[in-house]
Image (spheres, rainbow, N blue to C red):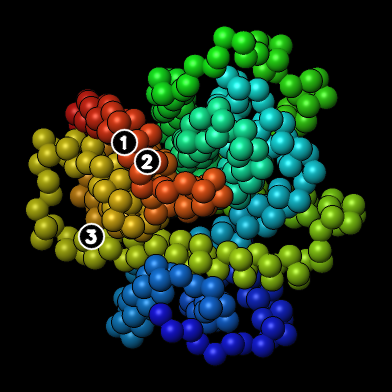
Amino acid sequence: MAKGPVIPGRVREILNPALALYLLVTGAMAIVVPVPDIPTVFALLALALLNHRSLNRPAWIIGGLVLGLFLWGWGGGWIDATGALARMTFLAAFLVALGLLSRAASRAPDIRKAATVVANRPRGARYLFVTLGTHIFGIFLNFGAASLMATLLAQTRETLEKQNAVEDLTLSMLRGFGAMPMWSPLALSTIITLSILPEVDYFQILPYGLAAAALYLGAGYLASRGTRTVPPPDADQPTISRAMPPVPDQIILLRVVARVALLVAVAFALHLAADLSMPASVLLAVLGFSLAWWAIQVVARLAPALHRELAATAQSGVNEIVIVSCAGFLGAVIAWFVASFDGALPAPPDALVPALIALVPVGMVIGGLSALNPIVSASILLGVLHPLVPEPALMWLALAAILGWGLTAASTPFTANVLITTRIMQLDPAPLLRRGNLKLTALSLAALGLFLTTCTVISL
């Protein structure tokens, strides 16, 4: 795709932070007071054009499609009825807030130290530490967790090659990250799914998400043990004392876990005490946490001024901001179109609903194998099925999308975490996933489909 003219850097330095601040403030204010949504579209359009040289092909495609739908709906007078603009406003603000949090976490010395501790565990214990470390860091850093862990492990690549551990540890990172969207309230899977299905409460799906993440990580560990090379007899055998880091390093790890727990607790408290939806609670928690963390780092002279922080967040995250916001818009419009038929479309019989829900994760994985981002596939599938699925089964539809998202993130060669991790570890993603994750993905989809089918039948 041809690149447009270069926009002077000074213009970007002024407009990028202004646009990011507008999106952030508007999205936060919309939680408590009505705000005009139309300007959000033009703010996103300006942000995209300002950083057009950084946009990838999916961002151009979905951005152009959404812009056309917006102009059609605005001119036709039906755009407000869809609720798409409000969802776009919220998701744009959330992506900016998440970007601020990720940047603050990436600068924190204890986060980097904790990642180093995890990556330097002895052979035998290293898989578990790396997969759990990537899982926890992913809550703060999102895709940055894959980059951080892979960069640290790549520094010892020669040793890992001698131990035949490069592929094993790469898979451990992919699986650790893939389990994070299955339960985390900060994950895009949770935010987008619950914004499309507001009837579902996060605490309804949390136990199932945690159980699924634990089972997936455990199954991944067992699968890797079957392919792990047996060390020679004279090699040092791993013991619990050698596997566990020294007490000072354990304290650093506990501090990182405590920060994650604090952020999640704040979101839960807002949800329960302020009677806010979980997506709104998470946005406010992430915004407050990231700004407080940034302020602490400013005092310690570790962070730039706020306008530079916002500028860097907008410029580096423009693809995610455009794709996620537009996917939310698209899902709302699709749901509105389906619901607008008002009975003209035949509702699926109850006997078919369990199969439709069970096929959602399969559709997301197949879409991922076809280079369709799970943000887009989940928005489309939920937009279509939301008006057609009876309310008692909506919880299982939400769980299908969230768990399917996690499986897609770890099993298709086109997702960001797979591309980042395999590039740094110097591996070809498609053969790696075929050898290491194909059976695990197939078994996970089969087990998940059976579970969803059974639960949906019972709920109906």
Closer to the eye: label 2 or 3: 2
At label 3, which amino acid type do we have?
A: Ala
Whether residues under marks 1 and 2 lie with C-beta atoms below 8 angstroms apart, the answer is: yes
Q: State the CA–CA distance, disc 1 to disc 2.
A: 6 Å
Q: Earlier in the sequence, mark 2 or mark 3?
A: 3
Is any part of residue 146 visible from this angle?
Answer: yes
At label 2, which amino acid type do we have?
A: Leu
Residue at x 48%, y 76% (from the top left corner): 41
At label 1, which amino acid type do we have?
A: Leu
**Could you say whether the residue bearing mark 2 is in a helix, strand or loop?**
helix
According to the picture, the residue beneath numbered tag 1 turns out to be 438
Closer to the eye: label 3 or 1: 1
Query: In terms of image quadrants, where is residue 356?
Result: top left
Picture disc at residue 103: none
**Could you say whether the residue bearing mark 3 is in a helix, strand or loop?**
helix
448 relative position to 428: left or right: left
Picture disc at residue 433: 2
Decide which of 342, 109 is in the foreground and name it.
109
Residue at x 71%, y 81% (from the top left corner): 14
- Residue 22 x %, y %: 63, 72
Residue at x 80%, y 20% (from the top left corner): 247
75 relative position to 20: left or right: left
Whether residues under marks 2 and 3 lie with C-beta atoms below 8 angstroms apart, the answer is: no
59 relative position to 287: left or right: left
- Residue 150 x %, y %: 59, 43
- Residue 139 x %, y %: 59, 42
Vertical placement of 135 versus 51: above or below?
A: above
Picture disc at residue 339: 3
